[in-house]
Image (spheres, rainbow, N blue to C red):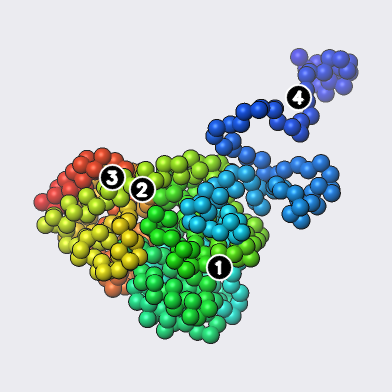
Amino acid sequence: MPDSNDPKGEAQPEGARPPQPPLRPRALPASAATPLVTPIFPSVVYRSVDADEMDAQYEGRLPGYTYSREGHVNATVLARRLAAMEGVPEAAGPGVVTGSGMGAVAAVLLGLLQAGDHVVASDQLYGRTLRLMARELPRLGIATSLVDATDAAAVAAAMRPETRMVLVEVVSNPTIRVADMPGIVAAARAAGAVLVVDNTFTTPFGYAPLAEGAQVVLHSVTKLLAGHSDAMLGWVGTDTPERAQAVREAAETWGFTGSPFDCWLAERGLASFPLRHARASANAAVLADRLAAEPSVEAVLYPGRPEHPDHNRVARVLGETHGTMLSFRMRGGRAEVNRFLRAAEALPFAPTLGDVATTLSHPASSSHRALDEAARAALGITEGFIRVSVGVEEPQAVGDALIGALREATA
Ligand code: PLP
């Protein structure tokens, strides 16, 4: 009880002090058996025994971590798993985990380019990556050219003596066009440019950038790899340790690295990625066929359909893996689209991809809203254009929900 005559307790005898927590111990409790699940290491900072030990760590003579923006256990565990999936050479290290997919894109650009350089990029990249090309890089004195990645001759024609990088996604969002990857690999090689592949849509199961001749692969881990829309992360893998170091230093210095908890969630999500990918891909094929048979659907964009505009290169680029994403154009305008989205309430209308649930997005009101109608039309994105990120649900149920909503909206 505080004494009202002695509120600070100064007169209290030493022995009567309330018990205090002990000073922080250095060692964790010992266990011969190790945890089955990777523990989460939320510590922002790591302690060293003395200055010599800290020197040794900074100089790479001792392994370990010092400050979590510059690396932590959960990032390394996740990076190693991703590097194994993407075939990153052992000598290049496990790559760099970033706090988002955009962090991965930004770390690559800032780590590998400088003022005066030129980048050739696909004109159908993820919207925010396009904004980096259009606004941020020119601000830093780096020129950019956007080209149609389904046309390797256009990619080759855009090269300049100062072109240092080519940046592409293998399957475009949301139009599901398949880039001419063999032609782009050859064009980048001939120009001596670093080829960077954002493999978010395709995943390591759909395309193997490093094995096919790219020097850098990156992901929004937020999407299919983590798979549950509850972790925001990116990752970059490179062919050489020098490139890895340049990207790592950019990420650490600009502050792009990811949190331990997100890495832990992504590691857990990754364990089921092969199963989720197989199920969602099978579901996508079923949905594409069901949509194609609907009179209210003008077109289905899915690499496994024979009428796909790039069908002749699908096998060469994607093999048998047609992916988990499809788009379609429904007949009608905004009124029909709104009716459809409301009727399809079992399928969340949410602008992301790669979740365990099937989600719908409407590019004209979200990712492509900054373009005017004519520019959208040039890409084939009409008001009735819907993108579907296919999930792992029971296929009949998800198909019935989609087709039922379309019929209700267009009746
Ligand atoms: N790259 C692609 C192909 C994407 O679709 C996205 C996001 O949708 C990103 C990068 C950015 O990822 P994040 O949202 O994790 O920053």
C-alpha span from label 1 to label 3:
36 Å
Residue 358 point in image, percent of width and height: 31, 46
Which residue is disc 3 drawn over? 347
- In this rendering, the label closer to the viewer, 1 or 4: 1
Which residue is disc 2 drawn over? 277
**Residue positioned 59% across, 38% down in the render:** 40
From the viewer's perspective, tell me whether residue 297 is left or right of residue 248.
left
Note whether 331 is above or below 77 in the view shown: below
**Residue positioned 22% across, 50% down in the render:** 287
**Badge 4: few (under 14), some or many (20 or more) residues near its Cα, within 10 Å?**
few
The label on residue 200 is: none
Q: Give residue 238's quadrant in the image.
A: bottom right
Q: Amino acid at mark 3?
A: Leu
Which residue is disc 1 drawn over? 109
Of the four image quadrants, the one with ligand 1 is: bottom left
- In this rendering, the label closer to the viewer, 1 or 3: 1
Labels 3 and 2: the sequence-earlier one = 2
Tell me the SS state at disc 1: helix
Q: Are marks 1 and 3 in contact (CB under 8 Å)?
A: no
